[in-house]
Image (cartoon, rainbow, N blue to C red):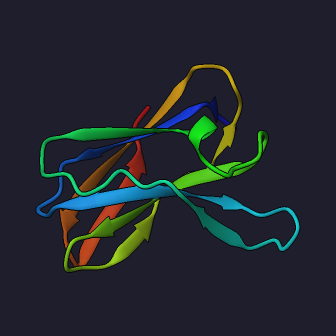
Amino acid sequence: MLQVENIACVNNAGFVMYFNVEFLDPNTGQFAESPPDTGNYPINQTRTISLDSTQVPVGASVRPRVHADGGENESGDTLVQYAQNGQTATFEVQGTTLDYTVKLIS
C-alpha cells in the first residue's frame, strides 16, 4: 500500500468541489470523515490536505472524500496509508456532478 503524508485532488471535473479525508477507524471497522476540508475550488485547480492537520491516526488507511457542489459525494478509488514521510498521493476527479470518478494517479 502506498504510504503518504498528504492527499491532493486535481479538479478536472465539470463542477466546483471540495474534499476532506476519510479513514478506516480501527475501533469500528467503518469509514469516518475527518476535518478539515479544502473549501470549494473550481475546475483546473488542485488542493492538498496534510494528514498531520487531521484527526487521522498514523498508520491508518485513508482516501479522499469529494463533495460536488450541487451533486453527489464520492470516495477515492484507492486506499493509501498515512505515514509521516512527506509523500503525496494525487487523485484526479473527472465527470459531472451526478456521475464522476476519483482515481489515484500518483
Outermost residue toward the top in this view = 86
Q: Quadrant of residue 4?
A: top right
Give x and y (percent) for residue 18: 31, 58
Which residue is found at the position 11% from the left and 62% from the top?
Answer: 14
Q: Is residue 61 left or right of residue 48?
A: right
Give x and y (percent) for residue 93: 29, 53
Which residue is found at the position 52% from the left and 34% from the top?
Answer: 6
Give x and y (percent) for residue 20: 46, 56
Q: Quadrant of residue 5?
A: top right
Q: Measured along the vertical axis of the image, is residue 19 above or below residue 49?
A: below
Whether residue 77 is visible: no
Q: Look at the image and tell me in which quarter the C terminus lies.
A: top left
Which residue is found at the position 71% from the left and 31% from the top?
Answer: 83
Q: Look at the image and tell me in which quarter the N terminus lies.
A: top right
Camera-nearest residue between 54 and 79: 54
Q: Is residue 90 left or right of residue 61?
A: left
Give x and y (percent) for residue 76: 47, 57
